[in-house]
Amino acid sequence: MTDSGIFLTHRHSPRIRRHFRRLVDESGPRVRWHFVYSQDTGPRPTSRIRADDPAEVLAARYRAMAEHGGVQGGYLDTLVMPLLRALRGDHLWVCEYDVDFSGHWGEFFARYAGHDADLLTTHVMSRAEHPQWNHWQRAGSPAWVPEDRWVRSLNPLMRLSRRLVNAYCVAMADEAWRGHYEFTLPTAAVVGGLSVEDLGGDTSFTLEERRGTGYIGRTPDGKPADMTFGFRPVRRHYFEERPQAFERPGLLHHPVKPGVRPWTKQTRNVR
Amino acid sequence: MTRSGASGRGSFSGRARAATGRGPTRTTERYRVEVADGVLALVLEATGAPLLQGPTRRVTTHPLGRAGAVLVELDGVPLLVDFTVRHPGSGAAHTVRRAAHALRGRRVRRAFAAAARSAR
């Protein structure tokens, strides 16, 4: 069955539109993409997907998001999950506008077509592998979840199974889950016995044959000098616009900010 | 393995499809629904791992429709849990089977609600 996916942007521009078109064209029939425009800090974006109300799909997380003042800074799950639940396909992709691939997207998605992991994402590390991660401070889980099973990830590009989308929403019915969804999502998947794999960085969640093939990012040993995927450095042009600026072919890149201010804790990209 | 819908005083074990929210969704999964020692647990059938555990004192149940669906609320968070066995099909024989499944679903739902109530 064809995968489905949402392309998520909080800015509208011809450059971002062209980037989306390349994603659609090169994915071909493998992934059916939907353009989603998040026009404000709330979890109800503009899209053609007929999604259920986030306040019902993830009610406890929705309350926490409202208290926090919006989806930025950890509550993007309240926006994404209702959309994914409404899509067709066994595997559901999320791609933010600032993710790029220095190659043909079709070749990228073909790498994962035969793999049935419930969660494929980046920078998947246990608490022991990345103890200095900022968001552990705000993290919380039900008492029956031991802290040594806590996991973090970075999700500008990820693939979820339909089973995980359902299981995650059910797990989050317990308001004891607290913190960034880059913690709640992979941790709920792990404790729910679902399979979590890294898209191809270098962590204990990366399959041996996939190590270093998806992106260069932080590892349990620290940040390599030639990172292609992380919080920084910021690139200003997409691969399609300046391929020569992407030194490493066939890898994911993040963040690419085409005329968009980079995210900071102060601005949180709130307009 | 416990028979689906089996219950004792304040305890219950059954199989259901479940999802968050109050309405139908295409994204449902099979769970083992258990009530024991004052705790409601939803165990994902595909993995056998518990996903949700909450004290029954924080749980309310409301029957929905004429078959085995029930709206469960944990601290006000809605979950649609459906004990009805559903098979696609048509014809008179299917209608009879569907009615029997609905009746059984209703019975299981009643047992579940009673267990959740008495375990509080």
Image (cartoon, helix red, strand yellow):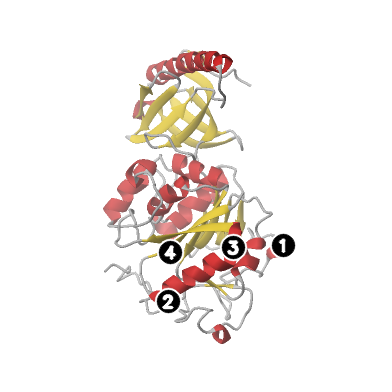
Q: Secondary structure at mark 1?
A: helix
Q: Are marks 4 and 3 in contact (CB under 8 Å)?
A: no
Amino acid at the residue labelled 1: Glu
Q: CA distance from mark 1 to mark 2?
A: 36 Å
> Alpha-carbon distance for marks 2 and 3?
20 Å
Q: Nearer the viewer, mark 1 or mark 2?
A: 2
Residue A247, image x, y percentages: 60, 84
Q: Nearer the viewer, residue B33 or A29?
A: A29
Q: Chain of mark 3?
A: A
Q: Which mark is in front, 2 or 3?
A: 3
Q: Residue furthest toward the front?
A: B91
Q: Looking at the rendered structure, which numbered label has been put on residue A15?
A: 2
Tell if the residue under mark 4 belongs to the same chain as the one under mark 2.
yes
Residue under label 4, please give it. A134
Label 4, label 3: how far apart the Cα atoms are: 38 Å
Q: Earlier in the sequence, mark 1 or mark 3?
A: 3
> Of discs 4 and 2, which sits in the foreground?
2
Residue highlighted by disc 3: A28
Q: Residues within 10 Å of mark 4 (few under 14, many from 20)?
A: few
Q: Which residue is mark 1?
A: A208
SS assignment at label 3: helix
Q: Is residue A102 above or below residue A129?
A: below
In this picture, is B71 found above or below A61?
above
Q: Residue at x 52, y 84 (%)?
A: A242
Q: CA distance from mark 4 to mark 1?
A: 28 Å
Q: Tag 2: residue type?
A: Arg
Three-letter amino acid code of the residue under disc 4: Asn
Other-residue count near label 2 (Cα within 10 Å), few / some / many at <14 / 14–19 / ≥20: some
Secondary structure of the residue carrying tag 4 is helix
Q: Is any atom of residue A130 visible in this view?
A: yes
